[in-house]
Image: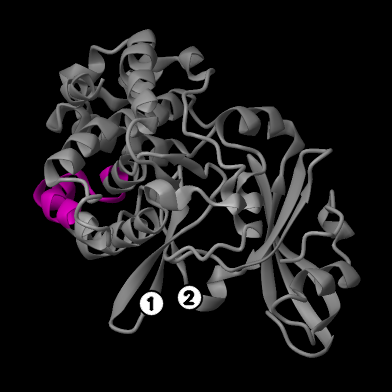
Amino acid sequence: MTTALAVPHDWTEITREWLTAALADRHPDAVVDGVTVDMRDDGTNRRARLAVTYASGSGPASVFVKAVDPDHKAMIKMTSGLLHEPRLFNSNLELPLEHPLVYAAVIDEAEEDFLLVMEDLAARGADPRDATRPLSVEQATDGVRGLARMHGRFWGHRLDRPELGWLEPFVPWDGMQYAPLPAALERLGDDAPASVHALTIDGLIDDVWKPYVRTLTIGPTTLLHGDAHVGNTYVVPDGRDSTVGFLDWQVARRGNFALDLGYFLQGALTTEDRRRHEGAILEAYRDALDLPTDELPSLDEVWLRYRASVAHGLTLWLCTASAGELWQRPDIALALAQRYSAAYEDLQTAAAIADLV
């Protein structure tokens, strides 16, 4: 993958020559003739869709580019891992699940800056999802199987690869203790159980989230997406079925499998679908790990770890919902806070964490 290019600091710096070089690994005969910004969406990261024409050869008619927003660099470093996503795709490892094709991942280590050039998923008919458009049970099961294939591929000693030497463990970070939790609880109202309404911000962070996150390095670890909530997924048509893909690998980490499994499943389904089908979906996850019998976690362990994992989604989305429109659309944040709140009571998460620690 091309990494020797300079990192453009503005979309206008992506010249014909620069993009020709960025596409060269997969489209060596393509010579870019024109680059036009079709769409831009600047938030925590800067994103844009570029329309591309060619003087010779052939390549994608459009690409999607992603770069860090300087105003959010400090926050991303603290919570996410500023350069993890480009490092992951520069590792040239095959990830055995659906994800966007990356043409180039360009990093400026000194400036702590990067730019990703990726496929435009719209060209494949991809349907981005968020909490207002949850997945079906069949789609969620497909997503869980994809995560399991990746987790199994990098399970335990299989994660010890030179290409992943930069990969950090999933550990707690500071900052969320300043969230105005009562604002989120007020917005939730009767949609949250009493056990959630009883939480204070100190109790949520110090007694629920941090103790859980500290368990993620106990036992075999694997490669984690790290941020596999439904808003980082998309669905692509695949014959009679559909395949669930995962976007935004910025929080890639090493840690226990259940962080991805629970964070995805508990937010991707409606509460009613989760309650009816989570047991069968957890079995589908375990079956898809494809591990030797002596390394395969028991169903009891999968269930315990899954119950405890609610702590992560609950904390992140209560804190997000407490911030109004600052970090996420309020309807999305509230829907996810509702789902993780229900799961916290249903799955007796506090008791599961106590069993793990």
Task: Check disc 2 and report the residue beneath it.
Answer: 125
Residue lying at 15% horizontally and 32% vertically, measured from the top left: 347
Q: Is residue 281 left or right of residue 247?
A: left
Image: magenta residue range:
266-283
Nearer to us in this view, 63 or 351: 351
Residue 250 vs residue 213: left or right? right
Amino acid type assigned to the residue bearing label 2 in the image = Gly
Which corner quadrant holds the C terminus? top left
Q: Position of residue 337 (x, y in %)?
A: 33, 33
Q: Determine whether 145 is above or below 241 in the image.
A: above
| Quarter in which the N terminus is drawn | bottom right
The stretch drawn in magenta includes residue 279: yes
Do the CB atoms of the residues marked 2 and 1 lie less than 8 Å apart?
yes
To which quarter of the image does residue 342 belong? top left
Q: Give x and y (percent) for residue 131.
A: 36, 47
> Which residue is depicted at the point 24% across and 20% down?
196
First along the sequence among labels 2 and 1: 2
Asked if residue 58 can be seen in this view, the reply is yes
Residue at disc 1, secondary structure = strand
Q: Which residue is mark 1?
A: 237
Q: Residue reaching furthest bottom?
A: 56
Q: Is residue 28 inside the magenta stretch?
A: no
Taking the spot 62% from the left edge, 57% from the top edge, the residue there is: 91
Percent coordinates x, y for residue 108 in the rendering? 81, 46
Image point (13%, 53%), residue name: 277
Crowd band around label 1 with a 10 angstrom C-alpha radius: few (<14), some (14–19), many (20+) = few
Do we see residue 228 in this rendering? no
Q: Main secondary structure of the magenta part?
A: helix
CA–CA distance between discs 2 and 1? Answer: 7 Å
Amino acid at circle 1: Pro
